[in-house]
Structures are given as structure tokens and as C-alpha cells.
Amino acid sequence: MKLSLAIVAFALAIPAASYAQDSTAATNGEYPNTFSSGSANVSPFTNQSKRFNDWSISVGAGVPLMQSSDLTSIKNGNGKNLFGYSAYVSIDKAITHAFGINLQYDRGETRQGWFNTKDAAPDATAVGARTQYDAISLLGDVNFSNLLRRVDNHSTYRWAIHGYAGVGTIAYRAYQKDIKGQRLMTEIKPFQLGSMFMQAGAGLKFKVNKRIDLEGRLMYVVTGDDEFDGGGDANSAINKRSEQNSDNFFNATLGLSFKLGKHDSHVMWHDPLQEIYYKLDVLANKNQDIEVCKKGDADNDGVCDDWDRQLDTPAGARVDGAGVALDTDLDGVIDLYDKCVTVPGPVENNGCPVKKDNNQTAVEVEKTLKDIYFKFNKATIRPESNSKLDLAASIIKENGGNYLLTGHTDIKGNAAYNLKLSKERAAAVVGALETRGISENVLKSRGVGSAEATIPASASDAERLADRKVTVRFIESSEWDSIKKKDYEDAPVKKPVKKATAKKKKK
């Protein structure tokens, strides 16, 4: 039987439905969390949002038949057909449309051997037995009808095939009877390692009404115990008749399930595919003629006037989803009229920033470079000056222009040494600014040493600090080409001279 893509989609959706029976539309303005489907119409799954019942109580009674044991209930050469009795009650919780968990209590008595233990032994070779048992188990419940139901099956959903499997603990008292009488052979208490058992089987349910289901089950019980049938000790003559180590039996029952809750339908009887296809049919039958832009688009910007927040957008302007003209740099000038789309600027300058006078720029740069520090008697700039250099570079890049940086020293010391040091320090500042993105054609340097110092040598070091500085001057284009990049030459690197090897004297 071929299954459509809808069946596959439903099977993939089963894990997601583990804690939710239905999605409730609710918009609260919050973004969905990362565990949701991504829809904005999501809300927490609560008891108030449930659409289906998911609890029920089941009861039933039936007949157990020993099948795999030394003493059996089915006539196969060691006895005759003997019928016991069984009953069960369970609390059932449906997790999804196709899976649930049942906590079940079983009580019953099996009868096996050559005769019913209620009767007298017919001869000295006949052996009969009976086993009274109580069991508690946890069963998984799979609704195969919901898993395998075809999407084109529109029949009333009243029959369902279920599969069960689980483990638990079983306590029993096994009696054996022969011509000498009846005696207790084995007693097992519950909740011990030797009392563990498992059972699995299938059931066919019929929905009588929205509150009651009728179900027939056939379960196979594996006791894991060779003494369950009343054969006595494992080494007894009876238990040596067959090699199996587990006495197993069938349990056929007929029962009722009572569905609890205030809703009309139980989740295990809900067919999600039928609901999906019903909704699709409703949509298919609806009038699909949708009128777009009832109020028109007055400014012809592609956004209907029904939700256009700017009804007079200029022709040619790019707009956002609400019909508002775009202003990328948020300077109050829309992109259509903005000459500098990505850089904020005043309206009167068409959205472009107003450049400062270059002479004023030179004053700002000089003020910024006032606190540049060098290592003692060197042209190496100290690390604490980096922030000042960054600011000076940003001012120059923002306003443009060509600038001459002049290095000065105080009057104290050797004049020739001071002149050399001022030239090197001015060039070092130019180099530091160029590493911060300033073009090599924008800055030049020179040094004047102590030629322009105004503080006498007798003054304190703090007072002579005013003469140790770098000044900045804007240079017009006509004058710029006549100035050298820097006013000193780097000292040539001397190559090492190889010594001639002495020739050996001939003897």
C-alpha cells in the first residue's frame, strides 16, 4: 500500500507532538523561542489549550493458557485442555495520537497438567498443577491505525489496532497435585530480581461512544521462571521433561476502556490527517478572489494605501515595507535627495557633512598632537600617545588638505643635536599618522630645532616644555610641491668590509 507524502509528514511530526495536542493561535508581540516551529502564532501548551482527553481507565477479564512449560494447559501429550481465569485493570495515559503508556495490574490463575486440581487424581502417574499470580507492569501502547491510516480513507474512525509491550514484576504461588494430594511447590514474592517478567501482544479496539471503548487483547507473557507451572524444583523429574527455562503463557482478554475528561474526543481516536485534509477542502471551496489594494496606491510606490504610512512619497524614492522613503544614514534627508547616502549631513548641504576650514583643521590637529610623548633623547613615540595619533588621523581624513608638521625643541643643549632630533621626531609623527590610513601625499615634515624657542635655558624643565612641540600648518597646493617630504636624509647603511686572507709564504 502506497502512502502519500502527507503520511510521511505526519510520521515526522509525531515527536514534535509529544507534549502538544494542538497549536493555539495567540500573538503577544514576542518572537518565538528557538524550540518553536518559527510561527508567530504560538503559545505555551497548557491544560486550558487541550482539545482532547488523554486519560482513561481499562478493565477486563479473560483466560490464561500455559503454552511453553513442562505442564501445559493445551493438550499436547501431557494433559488436556484446562482453562484458568485472569483479570486486569490499568491506568492509561496517551502521550500522542499514536503512543501511550499504561500502568497495569493483572491477577489470575493458570491450570495445567493431566487433570484439573479441583478433581481427584485419576491414577498414580497423573500430575496436575495450578498457579495463582499477581503482576504489575508498565506497558507501551502503539496505535498502529493512526500510524498506517491512508489519507484517502474517509470512513468513520471506529476501529483501531494497538500493540503493547512492557516489563514488570510478578508474584505467584504454584501448587502441584497428584494421588498423594495437593501441596505448595514454589512461592515468589513481588519486587525481587527473580520476579521480573515481560509481556507483549496486540489488541483490537472498537469505539462504542465518546466515553467507552471495547477491546479484545491477546498477550504473550514470558515469566523467565522454570517453576511457574508448578513443576517444583528445577531438577525435579517434571521440570526435566523439556529444556526451556521459562514457563510462558497466552492471556486472551476482553475489556472496556473508560475515557476521562471534559472533551468530546480522545487523542488516540483523533485522526490528524483527516483534520488537515478537511481544512484543505474548506480552503479549496472558498472564493479565492481577493481584492488587493482596495484604496489604491496614490503615490505609486508599490505599497497599498491600506497600510502605507507615507502617502506622498516622491516619485522614484525607494521605500520600506510600510511605504516610508528610505533614509540610510538617518540624517533627515531621504536617499533620493541625499548626495552622501551613507554619511550623515545637514539638510542645507544636501545630506553631506560640512567640511571645516583647513586652517582650522590644522589648529585642531596641532592641539591633538600637543601631548605626544617620545622616549628620552629619541624619535621613538611612546605607546601612551596612540589615542592622540588616532584622533589626529581621523580629523585629517574627515576634512582633507595638505599639512606640514614642524618639530621644535627647547633652547637647552647642543643646537646641532636639537635640530637633528626635531627633524627625526617630526618625521616619526608623519609616519605614525600614515600607518593610520593617511595618504603619503598629504603630510610632510621638517625640523627647526631650537631656532624658534622662546623660553630661556635658565628656566625650569616644566617651563621649557612649551618649546618642545610639533606644529601643524595647512599648505596651499601652489606651495606644496616645492616642499620636500622630509628635510633630512637617512644615514646610509655601511656595508661590512671583508678582510683579505693572508697568502701563505712559499717555503
Image: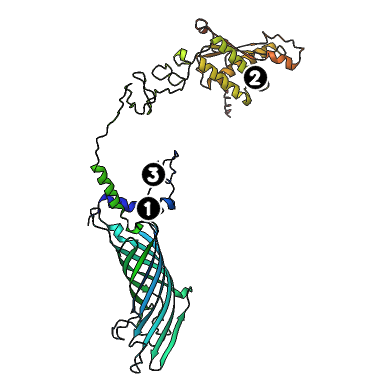
Please state the horizontal and vertical placement of residue 336, each as a whole percent of the image: 38, 18
Disc 2 marks a residue whose amino acid type is Asp
Helix, strand or loop at label 1? It is loop
| Residue indicated by mark 2 | 371
| Front residue of 431 and 309 | 309
- Up the image or down, 237 lies above or below 263; here it is below
Of the two numbered discs 2 and 1 on the same chain, state the one appearing first in sequence.
1
Q: Quadrant of the N terminus?
A: bottom left
What is the quadrant of residue 144 in the picture?
A: bottom left
Mark 1 surroundings: few (<14), some (14-19) or many (≥20) residues within 10 A: some
The answer, for residue 396, to whether it is visible in the render is yes
Left or right? Give the position of 507 relative to 341.
right
Q: Amino acid at mark 1?
A: Arg
Q: Is residue 343 above or below residue 52?
A: above
Nearer-N-terminus badge (1/3): 3
Up the image or down, 268 lies above or below 198; here it is above
* 10 Å crowding of disc 2: few (<14), some (14-19), many (20+): some
Depth check, front residue: 355 or 379: 355
Q: Earlier in the sequence, mark 2 or mark 3?
A: 3
Cα distance between the residues tagged 1 and 3: 13 Å
Q: Are marks 1 and 3 in contact (CB under 8 Å)?
A: no
Residue 365 location, x and y as percent? 58, 15
Q: What residue did someone put label 3 on? A: 25
Which residue is pictured at 34% across the width and 64% down the height?
212
Q: Position of residue 407 (x, y in %)?
A: 62, 13
**Which residue does the numbered mark 1 point to in the structure image?**
51
Quarter of the image with the C terminus in it = top right
Q: Is residue 65 left or right of residue 382?
A: left
Give the CA distance from mark 2 to mark 3.
Answer: 64 Å
> Few, some or many C-alpha atoms within 10 Å of disc 3 (few <14, some 14-19, many ≥20)?
few
Residue 280 % position (x, y)? 27, 45
Q: Quarter of the image holding residue 256?
A: bottom left
